[in-house]
Image (cartoon, rainbow, N blue to C red):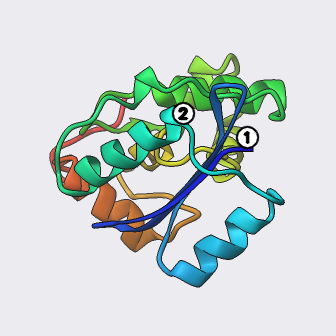
């Protein structure tokens, strides 16, 4: 599978594609951690055109430029159906905006499944392309984030999201 591993202004970013779609991606704080995560996908080939474009877009994004990651196809076929629906719903949250886990659960088809929506974000295989960092608690607190709350806060700040003035929908 084609793979990418590059340094950005936000830390190390890695991604893996298969058949022209992203199957995994993540920002990591350290080079060694990113290399270990990437190694879990086995032997990798050099990046393809999709990943080459993504590397440039991630660098632009880390520099504070608004980037449209929707142009990158994703493969969520390994995710359970509810997770897949929640992850696709999160992908629809506009740059610089936030939504509540309750909103996400409703968009995924079950407004009572707020915790499951949180778990879907925790198991997001393609972050920040699927922007799970834009999902926060209904009370305006950050909730959780696999990469740590400081990273979540940094991503939201980078996008200009004002959590004090924003009521998540």
Using the image as rendered, state which of residue 61 and residue 143 is in the foreground: 61
Image position, residue 115 (x, y; %): 69, 45
Residue 79 placement: quadrant: top right
Q: Percent position (x, y) of residue 65?
A: 17, 44
Residue 30 visible in the shown view: yes
Q: Is residue 111 visible?
A: no
At a point 69% along the width and 42% down the height, the residue shown is 120
Q: Secondary structure at mark 1?
A: helix
Q: Is residue 23 left or right of residue 93?
A: right
Q: Which corner quadrant of the image does residue 86 belong to?
A: top right
Q: Which residue is mark 2?
A: 102
Q: Mark 1 sits on what residue? A: 116
Expressed as whole percent of the image width and height from the top left, the position of residue 102 reads 54, 33
Image quarter in which the C terminus is found: top left
| Front-lying residue, 27 or 150 | 27
Is 10 placed above or below 136 here? below
Q: Quadrant of the N terminus?
A: top right
Q: Position of residue 104 (x, y in %)?
A: 55, 29
Observer-nearest residue: 156 or 130? 130
Element on which disc 2 rests: helix
Number of numbered callouts drawn: 2
82 left or right, relative to 93 = right
161 or 22, which is in the foreground? 22
Disc sitting over residue 88 in the figure: none
Q: Residue at x 73, y 40 (%)?
A: 116
Position of 19 relative to 2 (above/below): above
């Amino acid at each position: 599978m084609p793979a990418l591993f590059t340094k950005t202004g936000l830390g190390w970013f890695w991604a893996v594609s298969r058949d022209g779609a992203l199957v995994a991606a993540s920002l990591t704080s350290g080079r060694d951690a990113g290399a270990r995560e990437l190694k879990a996908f086995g032997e990798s080939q050099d990046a393809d055109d999709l990943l080459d474009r993504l590397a440039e877009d991630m660098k632009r994004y880390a520099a504070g430029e608004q980037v449209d990651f929707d142009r990158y196809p994703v493969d969520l076929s390994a995710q359970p159906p509810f997770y897949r629906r929640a992850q696709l719903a999160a992908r629809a949250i506009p740059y610089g905006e936030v939504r509540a886990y309750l909103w996400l659960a409703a968009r995924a088809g079950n407004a009572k499944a707020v915790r499951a929506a949180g778990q879907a974000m925790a198991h997001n295989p393609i972050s920040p392309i699927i922007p799970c960092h834009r999902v926060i608690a209904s009370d305006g607190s950050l909730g959780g984030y696999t990469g740590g709350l400081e990273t979540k806060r940094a991503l939201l700040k980078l996008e200009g999201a004002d959590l004090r003035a924003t009521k998540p929908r």
